[in-house]
């Protein structure tokens, strides 16, 4: 008599369970991918097959940055929300709540001709001062109230390095 580790019906049962798991797993992931594709409207799944990615070509992107949990730090986010509530803008302007997304903002900026950021900075000027910073003026670090406190500012760091 030959030694059998598992009887044939047990092997067949496990084979069917694993195969059904693979089929359901595949169907669920394809469905979730297409659903995400339709809700995001960037046709990423379609680009896998066609090689073309649809980019929503907004002319101008206005992005509010900041952490709403940190007091006045969320001023950019609140400003964008206030603009969205109070005014109607043309379809060429994309108002984006950038929060603390950092590099995750890059796909949202794709196709924009001009990009504006609203954020609170410590510029050693009078409170409420409005300043326009361009290119190398964008800080990579934020200095706290004393020079020994120097924190990395990930939003500007990622923005500045992506602009270069």
Image (cartoon, rainbow, N blue to C red):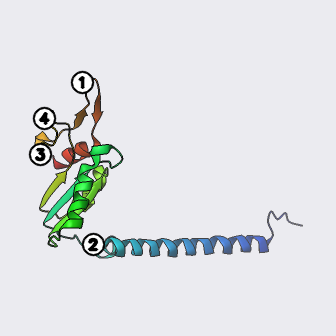
Query: Does the image show residue 159?
Result: yes
Give x and y (percent) for residue 105: 27, 56
Residues at marks 1 and 4, CA–CA distance in whole angstroms: 16 Å
153 horizontally vs 135: left or right: right
What residue appears at the point 15 percent right and 70 percent down from the top-left corner? 89
The residue under label 3 is 130
72 vs 53, nearest the viewer:
72
Q: Nearer the viewer, mark 4 or mark 2?
A: 4
Question: What's the mark number on residue 64?
Answer: none
Name which of mark 1 and mark 3 comes first in the sequence. 3
Cα distance, mark 2 to mark 1? 51 Å
Which label lies toward us, 1 or 3?
Answer: 3
**Residue under label 2:** 51
Which element type, helix, strand or loop, lies under badge 4?
Answer: loop
Badge number at residue 147: 1
| Residue at mark 4 to residue at mark 2: CA–CA distance | 50 Å
Q: Earlier in the sequence, mark 1 or mark 4?
A: 4
Q: Earlier in the sequence, mark 3 or mark 4?
A: 4
Number of on-image labels? 4
Marks 1/4 in contact by CB < 8 Å: the verdict is no
List the residue tagged with mark 4: 125
Residue 137: image x %, image y %?
12, 40
Quadrant of the frame with the N terminus? bottom right
Judged by depth in the image, the label closer to the viewer, 1 or 4, is 4
């Amino acid at each position: 008599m030959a030694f059998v580790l598992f009887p044939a019906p047990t092997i067949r049962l496990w084979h069917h369970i694993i195969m059904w798991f693979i089929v359901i797993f595949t169907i669920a992931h394809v469905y979730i991918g297409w659903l995400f594709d339709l809700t995001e409207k960037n046709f990423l799944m379609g680009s896998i097959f066609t090689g073309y990615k649809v980019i929503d070509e907004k002319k101008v992107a206005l992005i509010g940055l900041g952490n709403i949990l940190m007091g006045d730090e969320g001023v950019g986010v609140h400003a964008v929300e206030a603009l969205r509530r109070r005014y109607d803008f043309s379809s060429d302007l994309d108002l984006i709540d950038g929060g603390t997304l950092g590099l995750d903002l890059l796909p949202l900026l794709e196709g924009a001709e001009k990009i504006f950021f609203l954020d609170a900075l410590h510029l050693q000027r009078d409170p409420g001062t409005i300043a326009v910073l361009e290119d190398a003026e964008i800080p990579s670090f934020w200095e706290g109230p004393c020079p020994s406190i120097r924190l990395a500012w990930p939003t500007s760091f990622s923005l500045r390095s992506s602009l270069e």
